[in-house]
Image (cartoon, grey):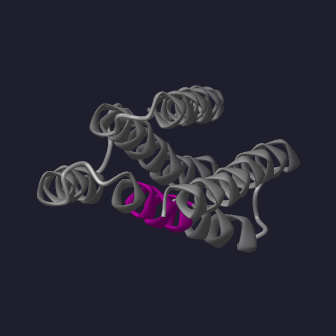
Amino acid sequence: MKYSEEISNKLNELLEKNYDAEKGYLNAMNQVDSSKLKMFFKRRASERSEFAKELRTEILQYGEIPEDSGSFKGTLHRNWMTLKSAFTSNDEEAILEEAIKGEEASLEEYNDILSERNLPPSIDSLLIKHKNAIQAAINTEKLHEELVS
């Protein structure tokens, strides 16, 4: 496998996760009543959309084809969130817990790819920027969770 293809494959994995996160946040936004939480989820979805655009650009620069949708696992997680919210009467705390789980999984993916240390510096810095934003979102979600519990 060529180096550019190897990097693109890794970036495509993250791209799918960002599509999944964006859709998950939009789903969460529709499951809550709090206008503050709606706005928070909308901002997170927008942030993940921007991450996806940045990753697509990097993949294209390597002459590879970016993924155009999320993963099967992400679809399952969103369906689980929808089902869970139906049984918990749109319990905002439960929805935040699921959002945190999703973000922690994303953070793990970013950490795994960054730990390989064979990425060009421009991609490395982009992924660190994304990772830091995801960690900040987790911290904020945990704070929101404490406020609604």
Give percent across and percent down for residue 142.
Answer: 61, 62
Quadrant of the image occupied by residue 27? top left
The residue closer to the viewer here, 47 or 31, is 31
Residue 61 relative to residue 68: left or right: right
73 shown above or below 59: below
State the residue at coordinates (44%, 56%). 96
Asked whether 35 or 74 is in front, the reply is 35
Q: Main secondary structure of the magenta part?
A: helix
Left of 103 or right of it: where is 30? left
Residue 42 in picture, x, y percent from top left: 49, 28
Q: Is residue 103 magenta?
A: yes
How far across and how far down the image is residue 73, in percent? 26, 60
Along the horizontal axis of the image, is 141 left or right of 93?
right
Q: Which residues are magenta?
A: 96-106
Q: Tell which of 46 and 41 is nearer to you.
A: 41
How far from the left and from the top, in percent, is residue 48? Answer: 55, 36
- Name which residue lies at 48% across and 64% down: 149
- Quadrant of residue 146 in the image? bottom right
What residue lies at 59% left-to-right and 53% top-to-bottom?
Answer: 144
Q: How many marks?
A: 0
Identify the residue shown where x is 77% and y is 53%. 132
Q: Is residue 75 above or below residue 102?
A: above
